[in-house]
Amino acid sequence: MTREETETSGEDMMIDDPKPKIENDFNVHYLRIYYGNLFPYTDIHKWLSYGHDGKHPGCDEYYFGRREFSFTLENDVYLRYKSFKNASLMEAAIKSNFPYKIDIGAVYSVDPDKRHAYAQSGTNLFTPVERELVFDIDITDYDDVRYCCSGADVCSKCWPLMTVAIKVIDTSLREDFGFKHILWVFSGRRGVHCWVCDAKARRLTNEQRSAVAEYFRVYKGNENNAKKVDLMGHSLHPFLARSYVDFIKSFFEGELQATQSIFSSKEKYEKILGMITDEDIQADLRGKWENSARSSLSEEATSLLRWEQLKKALQSKRNKALSLRTCVEEIVFTFTYPRIDLEVSKQMNHLLKAPFCVHPKTGRVCVPIDPNNCDEFDPLAVPTLSQLIEEINSGGLRMDVDDDDSDSSLLGKSIKFFRSSFLEPLLKSCKEEIESSYKTKIAKTKDSFSW
Amino acid sequence: MEVIRSQKRTVSNDVVSTPTLPLYLTAPHMEVRLEEFELFAIDRLRVLKGVSDGLARARNPNEMDDLVETLWKEHMRLSNVSEMINKDIISHFVLRLVYCRSDELKKWFLSMETALFRHRFRLKKIEEQRAIVGEFGLPYKAVIGAELESLKERLGLVARSHGQISSDVENIYYKVPFEEVPDLVASRRVLLQKGFAFVAGTQLVSLVVTQFRSHLSKALILTNRKWTTTIREREKDRLTPIVEALSTSYLGPDYSQSNEYADISLKDIDQVSKSSFPLCMRHLFEKLREDHHLKHGGRMQLGLFLKLDDALAFWREEFTKKVGSERFDKEYAYAIRHNYGKEGKRTDYTPYACSKIITSAPGAGDHHGCPYRHFSEDNLKAALSRMGLSSRGMEDVMDKVRNRHYQLACTLTFEAVYGTSCDTGINHPNQYFEESQKILKSKTPAAPV
């Protein structure tokens, strides 16, 4: 029962090779079981309600109902502007549609499925009001600097690029921007998503989101320009300096050399030589490396040696031109610094895939990633749909997601992490905020009686 | 503001106390002569148009400061200061009426007035700047003493990362929530810590500009409401015709209504792309033919330029070579019909002008943007030689590019390709196309283009 699995638009616009994929990790029968028994409806509902559970007088009971969801169904039918008043309605809709993909959009001023009722007056009353600050990092955006894979594939050699990206961005979101409630999620195949859920983040305007995305942006280029990272100035901005010193320098000089051997062939090192603006240095290094082609060193050792030679050559000429001084950092940044998809972050109405969905091409669940342990994360060890079903069948376990013993199961670990590291602290903070803004409101109305 | 016909004008006392850089927070109480209503607005519009040109040429901030100073002197100067302030205020409010009437007009006006304000602010002395900040009533705390000491080293790094050679740091920094200075955050011109930006005294402009823009944006919405509900009708014999004339007169033709394109049929498009497309569109078109795909930015830029009768068929023909027709229908058809105003918001987007294309930022896998700006020298030269430029012609063009006159470079290319001069200069890809078609049709009236 094979179907043509397709990946719909949303965060990526790349077209995939029509290679026949192993399809037994994902099929609609397994998907039904997954949504029937395993998907954490209550947790997702709790998250997206941000404390508006009706238990406090300051709660907005209609908040969850104003959130847009979209479903992509098995025959590529795309349903937008779906909204649900409560968790049961959401669960019922998912269980009757069994979508291949669920996207989460913004919280709007009115229920998305009632938006037409407000469209008459000309001024647009259907507008996004809140939306998490989101980031999408996809490894295909690094294709020009990874030599082990390209396109849809990912392996243990190039995945570390994602790990470095998480570390750099997560640290900056916390240290520079002061955000606290950050959820990193595996996109299911070859990337990661980041959801920043602080109230301040949810209320950012498009312009402010754009500013944060641009703050993170370093790589500016496409095939039409040779030098894609331009770090001008006499020093790095403290954010870039910290990222360099704490994460990317050691990654470049260590793991990257071992996995990518970026100097080991002429084609590879020419790309790097093209980033050096001094033609004499280029020629000098080229000469050295062409002649040592038949060295007995391993690929990795060759790469490291050539990197040292390059640094030395630049060091000796560093006072000649400003551009040479930052050249070393520019090369390092080109190969390792995070490349986020700016368009995803800039607009409030952009939809992004929900955590705990299953990726149709790989059958893997979009599980959370712990940013403090992201070195340990292995995208090829993430539970697949068939493994989960197998687990149910063999153990005879009934997956009760509220069961405390659930952390021993494949999915249970992820759900437990989601709850303890992310959901609980977030809800605590939301409650406090609802409480305090309610108190302020009451105080104000009391004052207003006095006139 | 009251518009009258009398010869005398009474100036209210409020004017004397306003600073030399008005914030336009409230409509002034003064009487305006009808002739001044129009003339003042036209002069200001000349200034705004000049600002727009400057931005399109990607002038750096110091160049823009000079440009604004020159433009202001040329068009807005009057014999005494209070008259000048009057003209400033009156012209701004008149143009609000003119430019509040559609989203596109609002957007243009907001951008230009904000840019104008920014550069006029930058030209003021620091004490005047601080006074203006005060007028907006902004509650920012100055960072001094021990807190400043602890940040000094990193503040120095920020300054050096933008060209300053020493690690000297200013005397006063303001601690401001990062949300209030988005442009400083985006360009990494401030130190950030736990959600706060440390804004130098000399960077106050960013704070103020954000406030200015936000205020003006809201004001335009209110003005629009007032216009549509009362003013337009009440003034239909007097001010309304003037207001309506003002918005179309200085921005050049509106290419959203153009019907030149009904003339390109799908079968001719390859040839037309080589003969009449400007370089930016030719590049996108070639890449589309080559890869059978374009990313979003490219689809927008090329798609809006083309405005074909049967655009959907055009895109479908290309994309289905790679993507398959089922997938095209599901994934891309919606987006393309959206561009042409047949889905969703149903806005018929206007084709991008050069100023917008130049300021876009193509990233990995993108092919949009302005080749004169975004291509490396070698790639640009190769592309120009494919357009048929001689090496001397190319040198002239590259000279313009090196001086960042991207539109002039395109104009020179046009002149070289068609052997005529283009006095008005190219500021819109559709303009390039139209002019080119005119020339080609006049040369060989019977031959197919």
Image: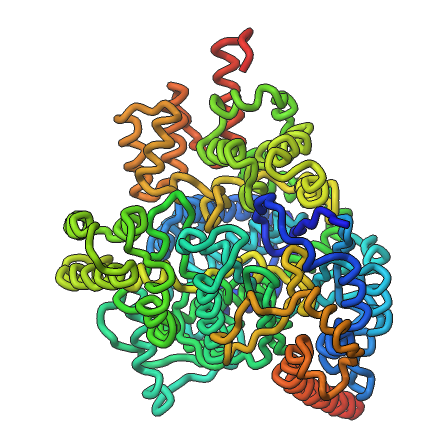
Q: Give the residue at the far front of this rendering.
A: A394
| Figure coloring | rainbow
Residue A215 visible here = no
For the residue pair B448 and A50, the one nearer the viewer reads as A50
x and y percent of residue B123 in the render? 37, 62
Task: From the viewer's perspective, tell me whether residue B332 is left or right of residue B61.
Answer: right
**Residue that appears at 36% across and 46% down:** A225
For the residue pair B201 and A411, the one nearer the viewer reads as A411
Q: Is residue A200 above or below residue B95?
A: below
Q: Indicate the quadrant where residue A355 lies.
A: bottom right
x and y percent of residue A5 in the render? 69, 50
State which quarter of the image contains the C terminus of chain B. top right
Q: Is residue B404 above or below residue B417?
A: below
Task: From the viewer's perspective, tell me whether residue B376 is left or right of residue A83.
Answer: left
**Residue that appears at 31% across and 46% down:** A267
Q: Indicate the quadrant where residue A431 lies.
A: bottom right
**Residue that appears at 52% across and 77% down:** A371
**Residue that appears at 28% across and 69% down:** A235
Task: From the viewer's perspective, tell me whether residue B200 is left or right of residue A381.
Answer: left
Residue A310 visible here = yes
